[in-house]
Amino acid sequence: MMERKELGRKDVIIIGGGVNGLVAAAYLAKAGRKVLLLEKKDILGGIAVTEEFFPGYKFSSLVDGIGYLSPRVSSDLKLAQHGLEIIPVDPVICSLQPSGEHLIISQDVSATADNIAKFSAADARAYPKFVEMLGKISAVVEGIMQMTPPDLPEIGLKNLADLRPLLKPVRRIGRKDFMQVLRVLPMPVADLLNEWFESEIIKGGIAASALLNSSLGPQEAGTVYTFLYNWGGSNNGLFRSSGNINGGMGALSQALVNAAESLGVEIQTNAHVERIMVSNGIASGIELNNGDRYLANSVVSSANMNTTFLNLVDPYFLDQTFVRHLTNIKYRGTTARVHFVLEELPRFKGSNGNNRDLFS
Amino acid sequence: MKKDYDAIVVGGGHNGLTAAAYLAKAGKKVLVLERRYLVGGAAVSEEINPGFIYTVFSYVVSLLRPEVIQELELHKHGLHLLPTNNSFIPMDNGDYLAGYPDHARSLEEIRRHSRRDADVYDQFNNTLYELAFAVKPILGYTPPDPNNPGLSGLQTLNHFRKHLQSLGKEKFHWFTKIMTMSAYDFLSEWFESDILISKISINGIIGTMLGIKSPGTAYVLLHHYMGEFDGALSSWASQKGGTGAVSEAIASAARSFGAEIRVNAAVEQVIVKNGKAIGVALENGDEIYADVVISATDPYVTFRKLVDEEDLPSELVEAIDKFKFRGSSGKVNLSLDALPEFTAMKDKSLLQGGIYICPTTDFMEQAYDDAKYDDFSRKPFLECVIPTTVDPTMAPPGKHVMSIFVQWASYNMPKYGDRDQQRDAFGKAVIDTLAEYAPNIKDLILHQQVLTPWDIEDITGLTQGNIFGGELTLDQLFVFRPAIGWSDYKTPIRNYYQCGSGTHPGGGITAGPARLAALQILKDGK
């Protein structure tokens, strides 16, 4: 017979010690809350982990690169001081071609244009204007990313504050360019690229950044949105983020853990939350799978929607329409990763012995 | 300045005829100039095979604006719509899914495939009707110029906002889903039966170079729920005598108001002087002058063929060059010695409605796959109608005509072989596919007309054979149709207007664009 223990009351309990859980914990602790973070595995970081598959060889096993790491979060939580070191890299995109003449898109726009000229002179001329235009309109999508989504359709004056991150870039780019944003947003990225470029190699190389981690193809609508999303969220203002974290993704998690702990967050691993306790329609705490309970004024779940609402909460407390919409959320996985241990750097066709310029 | 007419309409398709009718009704002296020997554009009935009348391109009517029918009194001019509420879809296992005019019977049929789907079906339709009602008003409004909306533009937007808010949260949620999702994904949230999803998803891809799993197709589905016939939404109808008779009815109405219609009168150019349209020059050299010239052709012809580039701002030229006209469909018209026998069809009355070859959602998506690479579907989606089952006058006694709408076929498929070769291969793929479900069809064919997208372009003038005068994708609708700032039927050339399907509310036999254009012209005091 397990003895259930009531282990005390916190201000906030956070379920899940992935990147989002750690960041939420840090911000709340920074604001003075007493925060407890519970992670069911024995390591923290969620998808941002470094694993040593073979002795001496470390891999960012699930994702790599700095992704959309918000510079704001990085500076608010002083991640650099807590061990996060980002190594900027160039090129941004290297699209290998069977001919050995590779497409190299680097941060330097005119150097890139010179490289593109090998495939198409017209595309080389279009490229800098394309980058300029995309830089402008991606700001709108970036604004969207920073908004707390309004509760449509009941949108009114009270929402003006929420809309501010969006209104600023809209006002900055002006009405004419904003109409262009509205026009291209629903388009497939292939259509957008067909408007600017003629070379399939250029179009293919650029389109790839719209398709990362998505289940869509370039001829499907919605891929301009994902394209702008990746552009706007990039750390270099170009196509997608490029940069490596010294130590792999696990180093990001470690920096976040350091930051959170330095702010007073209490972190427990091997702590598997079984259910969220609800009384009178209000979340009152959590219960672990060993029966121990914690009470809290707020419970924050960083687990996915289905886990949170269909596993951790008694469905009695949920609106049926809500549950139905929940079960319709799509989680179609489309990516796989293959990790290699190599004796030396691969030698790609066409490069004159020196591969360094191809790697990022 | 000498003038022969108050207004000249270039192009005698159903929109051109409608614009002419409204202007003539308002007292204007109107001339319609049509290149072909008959009016109707893509809504024509022709005796391609002696004794057999083909409804050559379009074949059903649904979205014809009720206010147009009423205001032009089209019933007095021969408009006679026959409801076709039967449908039949054979499946590969010998089973089928049918639809009936009787609602209870249709539900029973669905229940045969899935009890759950039958239970949800009415709620689904009600939700879509409500969403269509919310969105439909925008079909009747002139889109505002986002650069300069003006008071009426803002009023339009405000009305739209109010309509959306009146939906309430739950329906608004479905509204956002339907505007962004693929038909397949959207329908999968409601239904489990693959054949039912396949059937309903058809409406999401007609006339588009998209597949049922492409985002944006759920919207097109909604567009089709806005169809209105006798006030009942989303009913389809055949016209007695084929869709050519619809065009003839509108032409007759136009003539009754005093409009003049000339066929075999191809227009070469609009005559522009000092930034103003003053008339047209025919291919034979004749010049005819008018106060106003209205193009009822698609935006590519309107802006890139009928006028010179120098007379247009470069932004508009660029926008029109980017406007997508990808033809995605072909048509096969057959003269038949007798009615075809579908293996899976027990109830022969189902021959009177729409017969669809789309046995599974995979079939639909794979048909689209072929087209993505500029080719034609090796096993295409087919929508077949046998008009002689409701209007026997279209063929000799006992014989029949069959109209087959086909997707997909790319305008660019000649890149794999010359036009004639590709047309033959395409026609063969259609008949072979049909024969899998109606094995006796090949024995019954007396005559066959195969129309590829370039054939459609050559005959009707529709750019790249796109049946809607420009694709109905979100980036090409409403204020974007056909270009930002030019969605209110005017053009940068004074007294030169546009009224075809390439303007709001878009394609299909609706007469919607032309009515709004005509009202705009009258409002401008022309």
Image (cartoon, grey):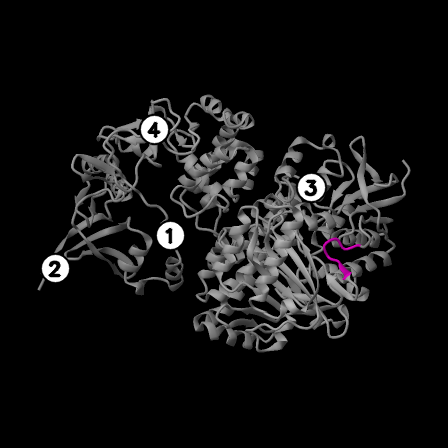
Q: Secondary structure at mark 4?
A: loop
In the image, is residue A273 above or below residue B154? below
Q: Secondary structure at mark 2?
A: loop
Number of other residues with Cα within 10 Å of mark 1, as a class: few under 14, some 14 to 19, many 20 or more: few
Residue A329 visible, this orientation: yes
| Callout 4 crowding tier (Cα within 10 Å): few <14, some 14–19, many ≥20 | few
Q: Earlier in the sequence, mark 2 or mark 4?
A: 2
Q: Which residue matches tag 1?
A: A332
Between marks 2 and 4, how big is the CA–CA gap? 55 Å
Q: Which residues are magenta?
A: B39-48
Q: Marks 3 and 4: which is nearer the front?
A: 4
What separation in Å lies between label 1 and label 4 (alpha carbons)?
A: 30 Å
Query: Which of the marked residues, 1 or 2, is nearer the chain's N terminus?
Result: 2
Residue B13 horizontal/vertical position (percent): 75, 52
From where the camera sits, is residue B133 visible?
no
Q: Chain of mark 1?
A: A
Q: Position of residue A76 (x, y in %)?
A: 29, 32
Label at residue B300: 3
Badge 1 and badge 2 in a common chain: yes
Taking depth in this image into account, of A280 and A21 the one nearest to the observer is A21
Q: Alpha carbon of mark 1 to alpha carbon of mark 3: how far?
A: 40 Å
Q: Nearer the viewer, mark 1 or mark 4?
A: 4
Q: Where is mark 4, residue-wise? A: A359
Residue type at mark 3: give it: Tyr
Q: Chain of mark 4?
A: A
* Distance from Cα at disc 1 to Cα at disc 2: 39 Å
Please state which amino acid type lies under the numbered disc 1.
Answer: Arg
Disc number for residue A4: 2
Whether residue A350 appears in magenta in the rendering, the answer is no
Task: Estimate the spatial distance between the alpha carbons at disc 3 and disc 4, rounded to whole Å.
Answer: 45 Å
